[in-house]
């Protein structure tokens, strides 16, 4: 299980740290069973509406092929001012 810092935009989580894995993903609480890895739907997705426009920290498992962060759990969030600071410091240049 890893920690990811990022922000929520348009209902998706944009990973800012760790940089080598930077991408935009959807979050799900389920483990990644091989049989349904490609069949995840909106019903499996964690709604990020309450975090829209904010920086959050999430724990989870990011597999090699991108798109979903498995076993995800939002562990912290910051307010609007700190969200802008996080994007400025860690965001793409």
Image: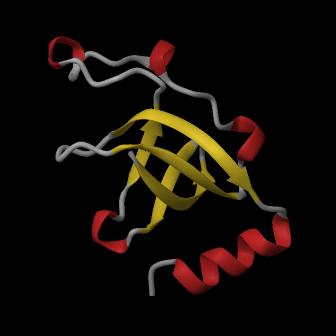
Picture coordinates of residue 78 (x, y %)? 78, 61
Residue at horizontal 55 percent and vertical 49 percent from the top = 58
Residue at horizontal 46 percent and vertical 28 percent from the top = 28
Q: Is residue 5 above or below residue 1?
A: below
Looking at the image, how many numbered discs can be counted on the residues? 0
Picture coordinates of residue 18 (x, y %)? 39, 69
In the image as oriented, which residue stretches furthest toward the front? 1
Residue at horizontal 61 percent and vertical 75 percent from the top = 87
Picture coordinates of residue 62 (x, y %)? 31, 45
Q: Is residue 59 above or below residue 29?
A: below
Residue at horizontal 62 percent and vertical 83 percent from the top = 88
* Relative to 81, 22 lies left or right: left
Q: Is residue 36 above or below residue 37?
A: above
* Relative to 76, 64 lies left or right: left
Colour scheme of the rendered structure: secondary structure
Q: Quadrant of the N terminus?
A: top left
Residue in front for this viewpoint, 92 or 2:
2
Picture coordinates of residue 85 (x, y %)? 71, 80
Q: Quadrant of the C terminus?
A: bottom left
């Amino acid at each position: 299980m890893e920690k990811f810092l990022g922000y929520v935009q348009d209902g998706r989580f944009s990973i800012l740290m760790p940089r080598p894995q930077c991408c935009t993903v959807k979050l799900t609480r389920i483990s990644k069973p091989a049989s349904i890895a490609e069949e995840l739907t909106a019903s499996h997705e964690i709604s990020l509406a309450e975090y829209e426009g904010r920086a959050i920290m999430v724990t989870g498992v990011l597999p090699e092929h991108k798109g979903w962060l498995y076993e995800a759990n939002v562990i912290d969030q910051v307010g609007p001012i700190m969200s802008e600071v996080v994007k400025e410091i860690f965001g793409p240049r």
